[in-house]
Image: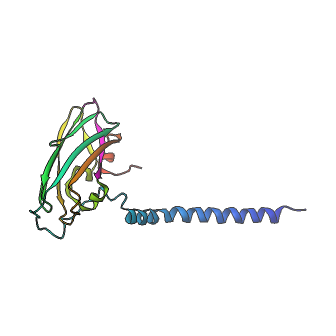
Amino acid sequence: MTQAPENRRMLVRLAVFAVAMFGFGFAMVPFYRAICDVTGLNSLTKRDSAPANTQVDTSRWVTVEFDANTRGLPWTFAPGRRSMRVHPGELVHVVYEVRNQSQRAVVGQAIPSYGPQIAAGYFRKLECFCFRKQQLEPGETRQMPVVFVVDPSLPKEVATVTLSYTFFELNAATPAAVSGRVSG
């Protein structure tokens, strides 16, 4: 008995499996994007445009609380203010301060989060340090602005919104890391 037909059958099965896995890997990027669009994941760092309704709602106030955290970074990071009251639709400027306390250059990326979660869809950041990676030299201190608008269509029952940033270290500070380019 010869094993050639069995070997050929196994080769075909392995080839089909390899092609299927390649197709699955290729399809993961659009599938991931579709999942993110449906669930709202990974949309927190996108630059927003000004809301369509640019009228300031002076009939109500929303308290915006600011929070700052670091994860694995030798940085101090704090908001210039802990909270403020704003009218929905009002253009607001706030500043966060960060200081690199290490003896080496460090690259970090800030990831925002919101509380309550429903507020994320109504919080429009027009300028934010979270849009880009940040490199701080040893001992460097930097003021980082955030410009935002709370959309006037924010549900009335939401009276307080918390904007929290967590800075994560990305990797060793290199020009390629800061620009987002991958060498090689």
Numbered marks: total: 0
Task: State left or right for residue 175 relative to residue 126.
Answer: right
Q: Residue furthest front?
A: 157
* Most common secondary structure along the magenta stretch: strand
Task: State left or right for residue 177 relative to residue 94.
Answer: right
Q: Residue furthest right?
A: 1
Quarter of image, res 143: top left
Q: Is residue 85 above or below residue 26?
A: above
Percent coordinates x, y for residue 16 in the rendering? 65, 66
Between residues 145 and 60, which one lies in front from this camera angle? 60
Percent coordinates x, y for residue 92 in the rendering? 13, 55
Report the residue at 30% width, 39% height from top: 70
The residues colored magenta run 101-115
Membership of 108 in magenta stretch:
yes
Between residues 63 and 51, which one lies in front from this camera angle? 63
Quarter of image, res 47: bottom left
Percent coordinates x, y for residue 85 in the rendering? 13, 52
Percent coordinates x, y for residue 132 in the rendering? 27, 51
